[in-house]
Amino acid sequence: MTLDLRPRAIALMGPTASGKSAYALELALRLHGEIVSVDSALVYRGLNIGAAKPTREELAQVPHHLIDVCEPWQPYSAADFAVAARAAIDAIVAKGKLPILAGGTGLYFRALLEGLSDMPQADAALRAQLAGEAEARGWAALHAELATIDPAAAARIHATDAQRIQRALEVYRLSGKPISAWQRDARGTRCPLKVLKLVLAPPERATLHARIQQRFDAMLAEGFLDEVRTLRALPELAAHPQPLDLPAIRAVGYRQAWEFLDGMSDPATFRERAIAATRQLAKRQYTWLRGELDTRGFDPSSQRGQLDAAVAGFLGGVAA
């Protein structure tokens, strides 16, 4: 039998508020590891409280990578993430440490572990055309158009997710091939790691919903709205013609807070909308996780012993 000599890594996947970050920190401290964030909100500077970014104390305890790498008005793609994450992983492995990949952004995990397809690059003129169509017809109408040409992509993309609707239509109009077909035919270089994929999630959806509500209320108490006010005051965002179209501001909670500060809702409605949006994110994450192969699922609260045993078995007992 041929020995698998690839460097090992642990991937902690799961829906938002499921306990991934806390367990990643615990593992990193116990196993002398370093954490690679796989979260599309944590890459942005200034998104701290609402993105549940690790605290300064936590960042000081363990090296974290792919956090605060760009400004909230700057573009950052899954391909950008994959390049930077692989560089971070190479550096971690070179030091003889364990990479711990933790987050809930499925596209980032796919780009890192499986590679991305060689689909058409962005086309500024076509994007401007699609933005004009959206302004005239609405993103829901463009989502309906996507459903006719690429039902698989439309099923994954929410009708309000302007960025992904635009990208899917852009790819189809440039190539005549649905983006879901490009993704199935991906030929990117797979990450050269032996990865233990662990899905952390409570067995009952109601438990996660309660955690989401409790966490959001804690964020409000911690000053989340003041954080959004600070973002709104940044010159680059204050001058942006459509700040709500930026991926950073579309992050769950931030969009609802921005609209609340624009006077579009009362405090109770804002809270309800933000919690509902976070639950919808969790639902999409569950859908992605069901399609992931070679995963093992655990409730980090009630199955800690089994979870630790899975890690120990993967690492040959060093985590026991």
Image (tube, rainbow, N blue to C red):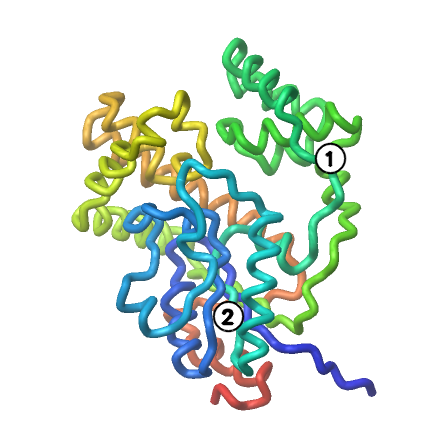
Pick the front one: 298 or 320: 320
Residue at x-position 57% and y-position 35%: 157
For residue 151, what is the image quadrant?
Answer: top right
Q: Earlier in the sequence, mark 2 or mark 1?
A: 2
Q: In this view, does 279 lie above or below 55?
A: above
Q: Can residue 162 be seen?
A: yes
For residue 193, what is the image quadrant?
Answer: bottom right
> Three-letter amino acid code at disc 1?
Pro
> Three-letter amino acid code at disc 2?
Ile
Q: Residue 23, how many percent across, how many down?
A: 40, 70
Compared across the picture, whether 40 is left or right of 46 comes to right
Q: Residue 226, how many percent across, how many down?
A: 19, 40
Q: Can residue 257 be seen?
A: no
Q: Quadrant of the N terminus?
A: bottom right
Contact between labelled residues 1 and 2, with CB atoms less than 8 Å apart:
no
Compared across the picture, whether 133 is left or right of 263 comes to right
The residue lying furthest to the front in this view is: 235
Q: Residue 159, how many percent across, how many down?
A: 53, 27
The residue lying furthest to the top in this view is: 136
Observer-side mark, 2 or 1, equals: 1
Local crowd at mark 2 within 10 Å, few (<14), some, or many (≥20)?
many
Q: Label 1's element?
A: loop
Q: Label 2's element?
A: strand
Which numbered tag is attached to residue 120? 1
Q: Name the residue under label 2.
A: 100
Residue at x-position 65% and y-position 21%: 126
